[in-house]
Image: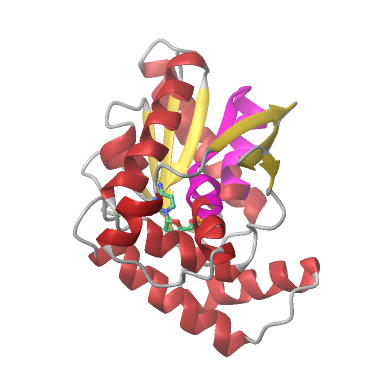
Amino acid sequence: MINIAVDGYAGSGKGELCRGLAKKLNLKHLDTGAILRAMGLYFARLNIEEFTQDIIDKYIKTFEVKVEFEGDKQITLLNRQDVSKEIRTEKMGAMASKVARYPEAMERMTAISRTFAENYDCIIDGRNITSEVLPNADVKFFLDAKIECRANRRLQDDYRRGVETTYDEVLASLQKRDYSDTHREFSKMVLTHDSILVDNTDMTIPQTIEHCYNLAVEKLKELGKL
Ligand code: DC
């Protein structure tokens, strides 16, 4: 099996990198943020926006999140309903970041991800994939870009989707998420010693994909997997 793990900040281009590498290397791509976003959506629908351990304990077993694939496309299901589009807002990203503070949520995401990695040549992205979910991945990337650049990318994404927001709102949300994702008690995002750090502030997406592709091929050949 080939397993590639990718972690990185919100808006660092993980999704596009993974889709690009998946295509070039014939891998399946799993987006673990989507799993946590679907959990966030469940709580948002209950009008719960702030969490406590009691709330998590009460609700964590009352919903089901699953992923399915239509060709290369990940379909994220919340209680069997396709929520793939609905979860793609900055608000659901922020909800996911809050849910991710709780080990009970992360355990469910980890179980789905590990089963996936056992069954497919794959690339998986998130915040704790290189460190916790797939510590033995063949290749590990940690993606970063300056926050102003990431905010602009997110703003453009929102604009394309017809979501009305401002640069300042997106920037503030990313700052909060960066802090929360790197300072929480469990499963926080860390740069592991064996991850390749890629800062793509001054790179286009195709350049980022090409750069990481060359590094991945080199590593996979070394391991005799290509
Ligand atoms: O990658 P994303 O923007 O879809 O992730 C949404 C949030 O989910 C992110 O701010 C932190 C959390 N997350 C996480 O903690 N661990 C993961 N493996 C994936 C996402």
Q: Which residues are magenta?
A: 16-38
Say which quarter of the image contains residue 210.
Answer: top right
Q: Is residue 30 above or below residue 2?
A: below
- Residue 39 in the image: state x and y as whole percent: 50, 52
Q: Is residue 68 left or right of residue 122?
A: right
For image coordinates 62% across by 76% down, the residue present is 152
Q: Is residue 147 above or below residue 35?
A: below
Q: Is residue 221 left or right of residue 25?
A: left
Does the stretch in magenta take in 66?
Answer: no
For image coordinates 56% across by 34% down, the residue present is 66
- Residue 11 in the image: state x and y as whole percent: 54, 63
Quarter placement of the N terminus: top left
- The total number of labels drawn is 0
For image coordinates 56% across by 51% down, the residue present is 38
- Residue 8 in the image: state x and y as whole percent: 42, 55
Give the camera-side residue of 74 and 25: 74
Ligand 1, seen in the image, is in the quarter at bottom left
Q: Is residue 96 above or below residue 187?
A: below
- Residue 42 in the image: state x and y as whole percent: 54, 56
Say which quarter of the image contains residue 175.
Answer: bottom left
For image coordinates 35% across by 27% down, the residue present is 137
